[in-house]
């Protein structure tokens, strides 16, 4: 029964539109919280809440660099699940490739000339 509980936790974690968008944002590389917040056009507190849910489900992990916290996917096999959902629904849930966001003060956006 425990394996079903674990599978249920993973499915519950990805069964939310914002969390799906976050995972897709992390598809290519790690991202800082401010970048994810700007990408989603959501308040930082709300984004942090969704990140915490994904982290507790074991799907993402974080690292701190100075004042910034960066998130990355723990196991890239989650993208096989998301790709299967895309195929089943006929929807494309991808994010723009390496977007540079005017509202984001992260070093990545500053480096690429926001």
Image (cartoon, rainbow, N blue to C red):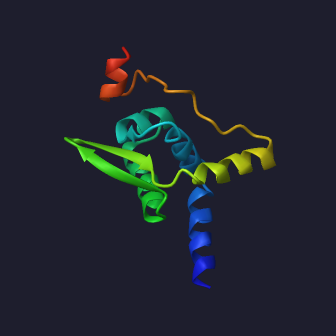
Q: Going by the image, does 90 lie left or right of 77?
A: right
Above or below, 74 against 104 in this view is: below
Q: Is residue 113 visible?
A: yes
Residue at 37 percent of width and 41 percent of height: 33
Residue 52 horizontal/vertical position (percent): 41, 58
Q: Going by the image, does 111 lie left or right of 88?
A: left
Q: Going by the image, does 55 lie left or right of 78?
A: left
User: Which image quarter is the N terminus in?
Assistant: bottom right
Above or below, 110 against 86 in this view is: above
Above or below, 65 against 50 in this view is: above
Q: Which residue ends up furthest to the bottom in the rendered image?
A: 1
Residue 96 horizontal/vertical position (percent): 57, 28
Marker count (numbered) = 0
Residue at 49 percent of width and 64 percent of height: 57
User: Which image quarter is the C terminus in?
Assistant: top left
Q: Going by the image, does 85 lie left or right of 59?
A: right
Residue at 57 percent of width and 64 percent of height: 10
Q: Is residue 105 visible?
A: no
Above or below, 112 against 79 in this view is: above
Which residue is at the front of the view, 2 or 109? 2
Residue at 39 percent of width and 54 percent of height: 61
Rendering quarter of residue 68:
top left
């Amino acid at each position: 029964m425990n394996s079903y509980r674990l599978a249920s936790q993973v499915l519950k974690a990805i069964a939310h539109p914002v969390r799906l968008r976050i995972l897709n944002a992390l598809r290519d590389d790690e991202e800082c919280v401010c970048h994810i917040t700007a990408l989603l056009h959501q308040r930082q507190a709300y984004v942090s809440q969704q990140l915490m849910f994904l982290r507790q489900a074991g799907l993402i992990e974080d690292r701190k660099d100075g004042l910034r916290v960066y998130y990355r996917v723990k196991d890239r096999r989650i993208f096989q699940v998301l790709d299967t959902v895309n195929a089943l629904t006929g929807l494309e849930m991808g994010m723009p490739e390496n977007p540079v966001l005017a509202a984001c003060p992260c070093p990545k956006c500053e480096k690429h000339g926001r």
